[in-house]
Amino acid sequence: MRVMERTFREQLFFLVLCLSVLKGDSRYIENNEISKDELFSFFNSELKRETPEELMYRRPLRCLDMVAVEGQFTFTAERPQLSCAAFFMAEPNEVLTVDYDNVDIDCRGGDLITVFDGWVMKGEKFPSSQDHPLPLYERYVDYCDSGSVRRSVRSSQNVAMVFFRIHNTGSSFTLTVRKHINPFPCNVISQSPEGSYTMVIPQQHRNCSFSIIYPVAIDVSEFSLGHYNNFPKRSMPGCAESGDFVQLLGGNGIDTSKLLPITDLCISFTGPTHMKIGCDNTVVRMVSSGKFVSRVSFSYRLLDSQELQTIKLNNVEDFCFNN
Protein backbone atom coordinates (compact mmCIF):
# COMPACT_ATOMS: atom_id res chain seq x y z
CA MET A 1 0.00 0.00 0.00
CA ARG A 2 1.52 3.27 -1.04
CA VAL A 3 2.05 6.19 1.28
CA MET A 4 -1.06 8.35 1.28
CA GLU A 5 0.36 11.55 2.70
CA ARG A 6 3.50 13.44 1.73
CA THR A 7 4.52 16.97 2.43
CA PHE A 8 5.05 19.18 -0.59
CA ARG A 9 8.79 19.04 -0.28
CA GLU A 10 8.89 15.27 0.22
CA GLN A 11 6.66 14.65 -2.78
CA LEU A 12 8.60 16.89 -5.16
CA PHE A 13 11.84 15.30 -3.97
CA PHE A 14 10.37 11.86 -4.57
CA LEU A 15 9.06 12.96 -7.96
CA VAL A 16 12.43 14.22 -9.14
CA LEU A 17 14.39 11.22 -7.90
CA CYS A 18 11.91 8.85 -9.59
CA LEU A 19 12.54 10.35 -13.03
CA SER A 20 13.89 7.47 -15.07
CA VAL A 21 13.39 8.41 -18.71
CA LEU A 22 13.92 11.77 -20.38
CA LYS A 23 12.78 12.43 -23.93
CA GLY A 24 15.41 13.04 -26.60
CA ASP A 25 19.12 12.52 -26.01
CA SER A 26 18.69 11.72 -22.32
CA ARG A 27 17.68 8.15 -21.56
CA TYR A 28 18.15 7.86 -17.81
CA ILE A 29 19.10 9.82 -14.73
CA GLU A 30 22.46 8.91 -13.27
CA ASN A 31 22.91 8.31 -9.54
CA ASN A 32 23.90 11.37 -7.54
CA GLU A 33 23.96 12.50 -3.95
CA ILE A 34 21.13 15.03 -3.69
CA SER A 35 19.82 15.36 -0.15
CA LYS A 36 16.23 16.37 0.52
CA ASP A 37 17.27 19.28 2.72
CA GLU A 38 19.66 20.65 0.09
CA LEU A 39 17.15 20.29 -2.72
CA PHE A 40 14.40 22.25 -1.03
CA SER A 41 16.35 24.77 1.02
CA PHE A 42 16.10 27.12 -1.95
CA PHE A 43 12.35 27.57 -1.63
CA ASN A 44 13.17 30.09 1.10
CA SER A 45 11.17 33.19 0.22
CA GLU A 46 13.98 35.50 1.31
CA LEU A 47 16.01 34.33 -1.68
CA LYS A 48 13.25 35.22 -4.16
CA ARG A 49 13.77 38.96 -3.95
CA GLU A 50 14.99 40.96 -6.92
CA THR A 51 18.71 41.56 -6.37
CA PRO A 52 21.34 43.55 -8.23
CA GLU A 53 23.92 41.64 -10.26
CA GLU A 54 26.66 41.86 -7.62
CA LEU A 55 24.31 40.44 -4.98
CA MET A 56 22.77 37.72 -7.16
CA TYR A 57 22.38 34.36 -5.49
CA ARG A 58 24.90 31.78 -6.73
CA ARG A 59 25.41 28.07 -6.19
CA PRO A 60 26.64 25.00 -8.10
CA LEU A 61 24.20 23.19 -10.38
CA ARG A 62 23.83 19.45 -9.88
CA CYS A 63 23.42 16.78 -12.56
CA LEU A 64 19.87 16.32 -11.29
CA ASP A 65 18.46 19.48 -9.75
CA MET A 66 15.35 21.43 -8.82
CA VAL A 67 15.57 25.23 -8.67
CA ALA A 68 12.85 27.61 -7.49
CA VAL A 69 14.83 30.83 -7.05
CA GLU A 70 16.53 33.41 -9.24
CA GLY A 71 20.30 33.31 -9.46
CA GLN A 72 23.37 32.01 -11.25
CA PHE A 73 23.95 28.28 -11.31
CA THR A 74 27.24 26.80 -12.47
CA PHE A 75 27.86 23.20 -13.46
CA THR A 76 31.43 21.89 -13.56
CA ALA A 77 31.94 18.29 -14.60
CA GLU A 78 34.02 16.28 -12.13
CA ARG A 79 33.57 13.26 -14.40
CA PRO A 80 31.62 12.59 -17.62
CA GLN A 81 27.91 13.30 -17.03
CA LEU A 82 25.89 12.01 -19.97
CA SER A 83 22.28 12.43 -18.85
CA CYS A 84 21.51 15.42 -16.64
CA ALA A 85 18.46 17.62 -16.13
CA ALA A 86 17.65 20.72 -14.08
CA PHE A 87 14.03 21.68 -13.40
CA PHE A 88 13.20 25.36 -12.89
CA MET A 89 9.98 26.66 -11.30
CA ALA A 90 8.52 30.10 -10.59
CA GLU A 91 5.30 31.36 -9.05
CA PRO A 92 2.05 30.84 -11.03
CA ASN A 93 2.03 34.49 -12.22
CA GLU A 94 5.65 34.42 -13.41
CA VAL A 95 7.68 33.21 -16.38
CA LEU A 96 11.40 32.44 -16.50
CA THR A 97 14.35 33.52 -18.59
CA VAL A 98 17.39 31.26 -18.79
CA ASP A 99 20.61 32.88 -20.05
CA TYR A 100 23.72 30.96 -21.15
CA ASP A 101 26.86 32.42 -19.54
CA ASN A 102 30.53 31.37 -19.58
CA VAL A 103 29.93 28.21 -21.59
CA ASP A 104 32.99 25.96 -21.95
CA ILE A 105 31.81 22.70 -23.52
CA ASP A 106 32.80 20.62 -26.55
CA CYS A 107 29.89 20.78 -28.97
CA ARG A 108 31.81 18.89 -31.67
CA GLY A 109 32.63 16.18 -29.14
CA GLY A 110 28.96 15.52 -28.41
CA ASP A 111 28.32 17.85 -25.46
CA LEU A 112 24.96 19.59 -25.33
CA ILE A 113 22.95 22.09 -23.31
CA THR A 114 19.29 22.33 -24.28
CA VAL A 115 16.61 24.51 -22.70
CA PHE A 116 13.08 23.14 -22.94
CA ASP A 117 10.05 25.42 -22.65
CA GLY A 118 8.16 23.36 -20.06
CA TRP A 119 8.90 20.12 -18.21
CA VAL A 120 9.54 16.59 -19.50
CA MET A 121 9.00 13.64 -17.16
CA LYS A 122 9.13 10.02 -18.28
CA GLY A 123 8.60 11.12 -21.87
CA GLU A 124 5.52 13.23 -21.07
CA LYS A 125 5.52 16.98 -21.55
CA PHE A 126 3.91 19.88 -19.73
CA PRO A 127 2.30 21.83 -21.26
CA SER A 128 1.03 19.31 -23.77
CA SER A 129 1.40 20.04 -27.47
CA GLN A 130 -2.32 20.83 -27.56
CA ASP A 131 -1.98 23.57 -24.96
CA HIS A 132 1.38 25.17 -25.76
CA PRO A 133 1.48 28.16 -28.17
CA LEU A 134 4.66 26.94 -29.93
CA PRO A 135 5.22 23.83 -32.04
CA LEU A 136 7.25 21.20 -30.24
CA TYR A 137 10.47 21.73 -32.20
CA GLU A 138 10.54 25.43 -31.23
CA ARG A 139 10.34 24.56 -27.54
CA TYR A 140 13.85 23.05 -27.61
CA VAL A 141 16.70 25.58 -27.78
CA ASP A 142 20.11 23.96 -28.05
CA TYR A 143 23.21 25.99 -27.24
CA CYS A 144 25.40 24.18 -29.75
CA ASP A 145 22.91 24.89 -32.54
CA SER A 146 22.11 28.50 -31.65
CA GLY A 147 25.43 29.59 -30.11
CA SER A 148 25.74 33.34 -29.70
CA VAL A 149 22.63 33.91 -31.82
CA ARG A 150 20.29 33.00 -28.98
CA ARG A 151 21.87 33.10 -25.53
CA SER A 152 18.62 33.83 -23.67
CA VAL A 153 15.48 31.67 -23.60
CA ARG A 154 12.14 32.83 -22.17
CA SER A 155 9.57 30.30 -20.98
CA SER A 156 5.87 30.52 -21.84
CA GLN A 157 4.77 29.45 -18.33
CA ASN A 158 6.12 29.13 -14.78
CA VAL A 159 8.29 26.05 -15.46
CA ALA A 160 11.26 25.30 -17.72
CA MET A 161 14.08 22.77 -17.74
CA VAL A 162 17.59 22.24 -19.06
CA PHE A 163 19.03 18.99 -20.41
CA PHE A 164 22.79 18.73 -20.54
CA ARG A 165 25.45 16.18 -21.44
CA ILE A 166 29.15 16.77 -20.70
CA HIS A 167 31.91 14.36 -21.71
CA ASN A 168 35.09 16.01 -20.43
CA THR A 169 36.17 16.58 -16.84
CA GLY A 170 36.51 20.28 -16.12
CA SER A 171 34.03 21.44 -18.77
CA SER A 172 31.54 23.93 -17.34
CA PHE A 173 28.75 26.40 -17.98
CA THR A 174 26.71 28.93 -16.02
CA LEU A 175 22.97 29.59 -16.28
CA THR A 176 21.43 32.84 -15.09
CA VAL A 177 17.77 32.41 -14.17
CA ARG A 178 15.41 35.35 -13.72
CA LYS A 179 11.67 35.62 -13.07
CA HIS A 180 9.24 38.04 -14.75
CA ILE A 181 5.61 38.89 -14.04
CA ASN A 182 3.14 37.33 -16.46
CA PRO A 183 -0.10 39.39 -16.54
CA PHE A 184 -2.17 36.54 -18.04
CA PRO A 185 -0.67 33.24 -16.88
CA CYS A 186 -1.56 30.22 -18.98
CA ASN A 187 -0.36 26.72 -18.08
CA VAL A 188 0.86 26.51 -14.49
CA ILE A 189 2.31 23.82 -12.23
CA SER A 190 1.45 24.64 -8.64
CA GLN A 191 4.25 24.78 -6.08
CA SER A 192 1.84 24.03 -3.26
CA PRO A 193 -0.76 21.31 -2.48
CA GLU A 194 -3.21 23.95 -1.30
CA GLY A 195 -4.28 27.40 -2.40
CA SER A 196 -6.68 29.32 -4.61
CA TYR A 197 -6.38 30.61 -8.13
CA THR A 198 -8.27 32.51 -10.82
CA MET A 199 -7.47 31.75 -14.45
CA VAL A 200 -8.46 34.31 -17.09
CA ILE A 201 -8.23 34.04 -20.89
CA PRO A 202 -8.82 37.52 -22.40
CA GLN A 203 -10.57 36.77 -25.71
CA GLN A 204 -7.79 34.59 -27.02
CA HIS A 205 -8.14 31.29 -28.83
CA ARG A 206 -6.02 29.11 -26.55
CA ASN A 207 -6.09 26.37 -23.92
CA CYS A 208 -4.77 26.89 -20.39
CA SER A 209 -4.11 24.32 -17.66
CA PHE A 210 -3.45 24.58 -13.93
CA SER A 211 -1.72 21.41 -12.74
CA ILE A 212 -1.69 20.31 -9.08
CA ILE A 213 0.64 17.34 -8.61
CA TYR A 214 -1.20 15.96 -5.59
CA PRO A 215 -4.51 14.23 -4.83
CA VAL A 216 -6.76 17.13 -3.81
CA ALA A 217 -10.23 18.32 -2.92
CA ILE A 218 -11.11 21.09 -5.34
CA ASP A 219 -13.88 23.70 -5.23
CA VAL A 220 -14.75 25.56 -8.44
CA SER A 221 -16.44 28.73 -7.15
CA GLU A 222 -16.97 30.67 -10.38
CA PHE A 223 -16.98 30.01 -14.09
CA SER A 224 -17.76 32.82 -16.51
CA LEU A 225 -17.72 32.89 -20.30
CA GLY A 226 -19.16 36.38 -20.77
CA HIS A 227 -22.39 34.85 -22.04
CA TYR A 228 -25.15 32.56 -20.76
CA ASN A 229 -24.72 34.31 -17.40
CA ASN A 230 -28.30 33.67 -16.29
CA PHE A 231 -28.26 29.94 -16.88
CA PRO A 232 -28.09 27.60 -13.89
CA LYS A 233 -24.90 25.72 -13.10
CA ARG A 234 -24.66 22.34 -14.78
CA SER A 235 -22.22 19.84 -16.17
CA MET A 236 -23.08 18.23 -19.46
CA PRO A 237 -21.64 15.92 -22.11
CA GLY A 238 -20.64 17.48 -25.39
CA CYS A 239 -19.17 20.66 -23.93
CA ALA A 240 -16.43 20.52 -26.55
CA GLU A 241 -19.03 21.46 -29.17
CA SER A 242 -19.54 24.82 -27.47
CA GLY A 243 -15.90 25.82 -28.00
CA ASP A 244 -15.66 27.35 -24.50
CA PHE A 245 -15.53 25.08 -21.47
CA VAL A 246 -13.62 23.97 -18.38
CA GLN A 247 -12.41 20.43 -17.78
CA LEU A 248 -11.37 18.73 -14.58
CA LEU A 249 -8.77 16.06 -15.40
CA GLY A 250 -6.98 13.45 -13.34
CA GLY A 251 -4.16 10.97 -13.81
CA ASN A 252 -0.62 10.04 -12.87
CA GLY A 253 1.34 11.81 -15.63
CA ILE A 254 1.91 15.47 -16.55
CA ASP A 255 0.64 15.45 -20.15
CA THR A 256 -2.91 16.81 -19.98
CA SER A 257 -3.84 15.16 -23.28
CA LYS A 258 -3.29 11.77 -21.62
CA LEU A 259 -5.26 12.45 -18.42
CA LEU A 260 -8.72 11.09 -17.64
CA PRO A 261 -11.57 13.63 -18.12
CA ILE A 262 -13.58 13.75 -14.91
CA THR A 263 -16.15 16.41 -15.76
CA ASP A 264 -16.77 19.28 -18.17
CA LEU A 265 -18.37 22.63 -17.37
CA CYS A 266 -19.67 24.84 -20.17
CA ILE A 267 -22.40 26.92 -18.55
CA SER A 268 -21.46 30.03 -16.55
CA PHE A 269 -22.24 29.93 -12.84
CA THR A 270 -21.38 31.37 -9.45
CA GLY A 271 -21.38 28.94 -6.56
CA PRO A 272 -19.30 26.00 -5.43
CA THR A 273 -18.77 22.77 -7.33
CA HIS A 274 -16.91 20.41 -5.01
CA MET A 275 -14.94 17.33 -6.05
CA LYS A 276 -12.33 15.04 -4.50
CA ILE A 277 -9.80 13.66 -6.97
CA GLY A 278 -7.41 10.97 -5.77
CA CYS A 279 -4.93 11.21 -8.64
CA ASP A 280 -1.26 12.16 -8.47
CA ASN A 281 -2.03 15.01 -10.85
CA THR A 282 -5.24 17.07 -10.82
CA VAL A 283 -5.72 19.60 -13.61
CA VAL A 284 -8.15 22.46 -14.21
CA ARG A 285 -8.09 23.04 -17.95
CA MET A 286 -9.89 25.88 -19.71
CA VAL A 287 -10.55 25.84 -23.46
CA SER A 288 -11.40 29.19 -25.08
CA SER A 289 -12.67 29.95 -28.57
CA GLY A 290 -11.46 33.54 -28.23
CA LYS A 291 -14.97 34.97 -28.53
CA PHE A 292 -15.35 35.75 -24.83
CA VAL A 293 -13.36 36.67 -21.74
CA SER A 294 -13.23 33.31 -19.97
CA ARG A 295 -12.68 33.10 -16.22
CA VAL A 296 -12.61 30.28 -13.69
CA SER A 297 -11.90 30.54 -9.95
CA PHE A 298 -11.13 27.58 -7.70
CA SER A 299 -9.48 26.55 -4.45
CA TYR A 300 -7.82 23.26 -3.54
CA ARG A 301 -6.33 21.35 -0.62
CA LEU A 302 -4.44 18.11 -0.13
CA LEU A 303 -6.56 15.03 0.62
CA ASP A 304 -5.69 13.21 3.81
CA SER A 305 -5.17 9.44 4.01
CA GLN A 306 -8.69 8.75 5.29
CA GLU A 307 -10.26 10.68 2.42
CA LEU A 308 -8.11 8.81 -0.08
CA GLN A 309 -9.19 5.47 1.34
CA THR A 310 -12.84 6.52 1.27
CA ILE A 311 -12.85 7.58 -2.38
CA LYS A 312 -10.73 4.70 -3.62
CA LEU A 313 -13.87 2.74 -4.59
CA ASN A 314 -14.90 5.47 -7.02
CA ASN A 315 -14.17 4.57 -10.67
CA VAL A 316 -12.05 7.67 -11.30
CA GLU A 317 -9.92 7.13 -8.24
CA ASP A 318 -9.59 3.43 -9.07
CA PHE A 319 -8.15 4.51 -12.42
CA CYS A 320 -5.70 6.82 -10.68
CA PHE A 321 -4.57 4.31 -8.12
CA ASN A 322 -4.10 1.49 -10.59
CA ASN A 323 -2.07 3.31 -13.22
Image (cartoon, helix red, strand yellow):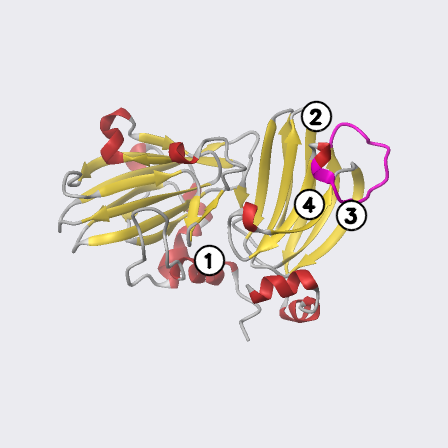
Secondary structure that dominates the magenta span: loop
Asked if the residues shown at circle 1 and circle 2 are in contact, with their CB atoms under 8 angstroms apart, the answer is no
Q: Is residue 76 magenta?
A: no
- Mark 2 = which residue? 292
* Residue drawn where x is 30% and y is 40% of the image: 114
Residues drawn in magenta = 225-240
As drawn, is 283 to the left or to the right of 141? right
Question: Residue flagged by tag 4: what amino acid is it?
Answer: Phe
Question: Residue flagged by tag 1: what amino acid is it?
Answer: Leu
**Disc 2 crowd, CA 10 A, few/some/many (<14, 14-19, 20+):** some
Question: Residue flagged by tag 3: what amino acid is it?
Answer: Pro
What element does badge 2 sit on? Answer: loop
- Mark 3 = which residue? 272
Q: Considering only order in the chain, which callout, 3 or 4, is on the residue closer to the N terminus? A: 3
How far apart, in angstroms, are the residues tagged by discs 1 and 2? Answer: 36 Å
**Disc 3 crowd, CA 10 A, few/some/many (<14, 14-19, 20+):** some
Q: Considering only order in the chain, which callout, 2 or 4, is on the residue closer to the N terminus? A: 2
Whole-percent x, y for residue 111 in the image:
20, 43
**Quarter placement of the C terminus:** bottom right
Q: Considering only order in the chain, which callout, 2 or 1, is on the residue closer to the N terminus? A: 1
Whole-percent x, y for residue 177 in the image:
36, 38
**Disc 4 crowd, CA 10 A, few/some/many (<14, 14-19, 20+):** some
- Mark 4 = which residue? 298
**In front of the other: label 4 or label 2?**
2
What element does badge 3 sit on? Answer: strand
| Residue 268: quadrant of the picture | top right
